[in-house]
Image (tube, rainbow, N blue to C red):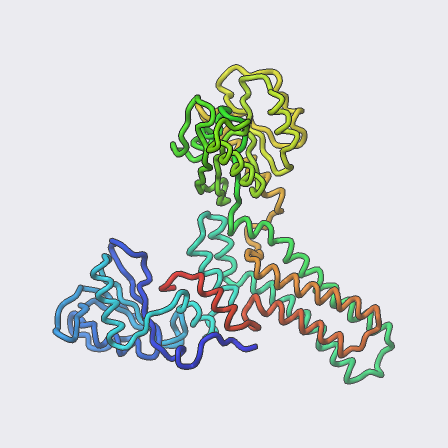
Amino acid sequence: MTRSCKTATVAEDTISAISTPPGKGGICVIRISGERSLAVIREIFMFHGKHRNFEPRIMYAGNIVDPSDKTLVDSAMCVFMKAPNSYTGEDSAEIHCHGGTACSEKVMELTLKHGCAPAGPGEFTQRAFLNGKMDLAQAQAVADIINAQTELGLRQAGLQLAGGLSERINRTKTRLLELLAEIEARIDFPEEETGEAVAESLKKVAESVRENLHSLLSTYAAGSLIREGAGVTIVGRPNVGKSSLMNALLGRERAITSPEPGTTRDYIEEQISIKGITVRLTDTAGMRNAQSSAEKAGIEMAQDKALGADLQILVLDGSKPPSGEDVKMVEKAPENTVVSINKADLPQDDGFKTDRFGEKKTVHTSAKTGQGVEELKEAVRKTLMENTGTVESNEAALTGIRQKQAVETALEAVNVFFALVEQKESLEILSIKVKEAMDSLGEITGETTTEEMLGVIFGKFCIGK
């Protein structure tokens, strides 16, 4: 399939959009792309001084004026970029006016009146992809940079934008292309080698492809964790300090705390960064026999949240002897659990021995004084990374489920290829499987994709990017 997701009519439109966030601000940036970009800014922008024409890639000072009545709208800066030396690869322009709702909307309105159509979500980056300025993996990295919540997420998105993932994919595709070329040469000159020699030669090349695909797949768990973050649920009996510990982790008062059991009846969610990983932290109702229907509902929600979490923080009150319920919770806790023995500022009961918790990471904490909170964060980070593996700081990883599925499909085609070789299947059939693997990898870089898929991908972008 070719790179195509818009009809020729839409692709010829000149589009505009406000690229900066809505609301008050020092500067608002309005982007324009398409063949009428220069004509539009000539209509509504008046130069300061002696300038009369736009030289590409030079920022000019002037005024935005409504041509219908010569009304001054704002003082602004304007730049024109000649195709193909622009972000989209088309003639493009940017207007930098003052931020604020009325001003930015008025300038945007003038661009629409003078030949622009409103840009859709991600349409500037979509045009950059269609015009060959970047591949699909790089285009998705643009959105990941915008959405990055942590330095790790930003770094991984930057590696993909720089072409790191595309390079890994293309290296594997090159090996597949070499394999296909060898197969087709064997078809053209079948008399040159015996069947066993041919099979061994083909399997040798295919094995290197399989190793590359396994290596790529091994990066997904950590890559997804860096990009999407993790759900961490705080669980435990009432009055062990779950809400206080959540406040300590957040560094601010968010959850209501009280010595009265059952204070937290609904779960509370907040997002924080723990050692470079985005964590969706959830405080839940204390686990006990409910005293009311509202508390029962809260406990049921807590159990659901705990089951769906990537990691649990099990909080125990270290100042009291372990109860039978404490022991049961420890025994039933899944492997992805970090145990917080809380209230370390009080005299500790000898019943909480670290050997009681097996291989689970255990941290003594005090939500009141902050003791052990940083150690708890580190234990959370280590447990999450142990469950997902790691990627090197300069290694581009698979971060999206679509990328993972494409590599899995390619690997499946290669595995079938090996089975067909063992079955002494015809070279023509073998070539089909090689092409299927190449097409699957091409979905990541955008060489083989559909209009519908591009619509889904770019539809998740913000307008103006």
- Left or right, 462 with respect to 216, comes to left
Q: Is residue 82 visible?
A: no
Q: Position of residue 60 (x, y in %)?
A: 23, 68
Q: Nearer the viewer, residue 118 or 160?
A: 118
What's the residue at 63%, 66% (across, down)? Answer: 171
Q: Is residue 211 visible?
A: yes
197 in relation to 313, above or below: below
Q: Quadrant of the N terminus?
A: bottom right
Q: Quadrant of the C terminus?
A: bottom left
What's the residue at 54%, 29% (across, down)? Answer: 287
Q: Can you tell which quarter of the image residue 117 is in? A: bottom left
348 in relation to 233, above or below: above
- Left or right, 384 with respect to 10, comes to right
262 in relation to 427, above or below: above
What's the residue at 64%, 36% (across, down)? Answer: 334
Q: Nearer the viewer, residue 199 or 460?
A: 460
What's the residue at 56%, 73% (across, down)? Answer: 447
Q: Position of residue 464 (x, y in %)?
A: 36, 64
Q: Can you tell which quarter of the image residue 196 is in? A: bottom right
- Left or right, 108 with respect to 348, comes to left
The residue at the far front in this view is 293
Q: Position of residue 4 (x, y in %)?
A: 49, 76
Q: Position of residue 61 (x, y in %)?
A: 21, 67
- Left or right, 382 with respect to 80, comes to right
